[in-house]
């Protein structure tokens, strides 16, 4: 199964309020496909490569850092979308992480106060199990977004 389909299935199975927080893999993939591959010198025949090297040497080009070509509109759009997506899921992760740190402290405090009250301890145990499940979801969220970003990098 392709990654995009797998990601889509995972998103459908996650918490509804998290669905729009995932990497927009499909949109990024579409933008990436609009970028035309650059012709590299190494893809030409040997004479072209040697001629190009001679021209650079004659111009003193090997002493300087190579000049970058300006980005195309398609490249700019892709980079902007990628930066927005990275910011989106990083912000969500940090927000959840802070929320979970606070919840963990609250649960620890409640356990300390509940000492011998079995009914309260059982209630807290259930909440800890739920809390653990949410943390596993957040870990999965992070891994999926990282994998999606990595897959896009491989396509470049």
Image (cartoon, helix red, strand yellow):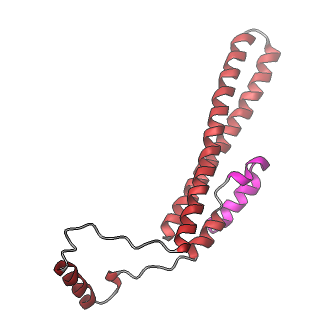
- Residue at image position (37%, 70%) is 68
The N terminus: image quadrant: bottom right
Q: Position of residue 145 (x, y in %)?
A: 60, 54
* Viewer-closest of 136 and 80: 80
* Viewer-closest of 123 and 82: 82
- Residue at image position (32%, 82%) is 41
Q: Position of residue 98 (x, y in %)?
A: 63, 33
Q: In the orientation shown, which residue stands out farthest toward the top?
A: 116
Q: Is residue 2 magenta?
A: yes
Q: Which residues are magenta?
A: 1-21
Q: Is residue 136 magenta?
A: no
Report the side of 16 relative to 76 (left or right). Answer: right
Q: Position of residue 147 (x, y in %)?
A: 56, 57
Q: Position of residue 110 (x, y in %)?
A: 72, 16
* Viewer-closest of 78 and 144: 78
Q: How many marks?
A: 0
Report the side of 35 relative to 99 (left or right). Answer: left
Is 3 rendered above or below residue 10? below
Most common SS among magenta residues:
helix
- Residue at image position (36%, 80%) is 40
- Residue at image position (47%, 79%) is 37
- Can you tell which quarter of the image residue 84 is in? bottom right
Is 20 rendered above or below residue 121? below
- Can you tell which quarter of the image residue 12 is in? bottom right
């Amino acid at each position: 199964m392709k990654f995009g389909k797998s990601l889509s299935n995972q998103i459908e199975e996650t918490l509804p309020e998290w669905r729009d927080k995932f990497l927009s893999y499909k949109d990024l993939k579409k933008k990436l496909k609009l970028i035309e591959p650059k012709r590299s010198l190494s893809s030409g025949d040997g004479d072209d490569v040697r001629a190009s090297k001679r021209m650079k040497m004659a111009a003193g080009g090997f002493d300087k850092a190579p000049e970058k070509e300006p980005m195309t509109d398609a490249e700019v759009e892709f980079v902007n979308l990628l930066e927005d997506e990275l910011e989106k899921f990083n912000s969500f992760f940090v927000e959840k992480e802070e929320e979970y740190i606070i919840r963990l402290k609250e649960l620890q405090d409640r356990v300390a106060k509940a000492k011998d009250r079995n009914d309260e301890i059982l209630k807290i145990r259930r909440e800890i199990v739920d809390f653990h499940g949410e943390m596993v979801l957040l870990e999965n969220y992070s891994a999926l977004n990282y994998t999606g970003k990595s897959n896009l990098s491989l396509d470049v």
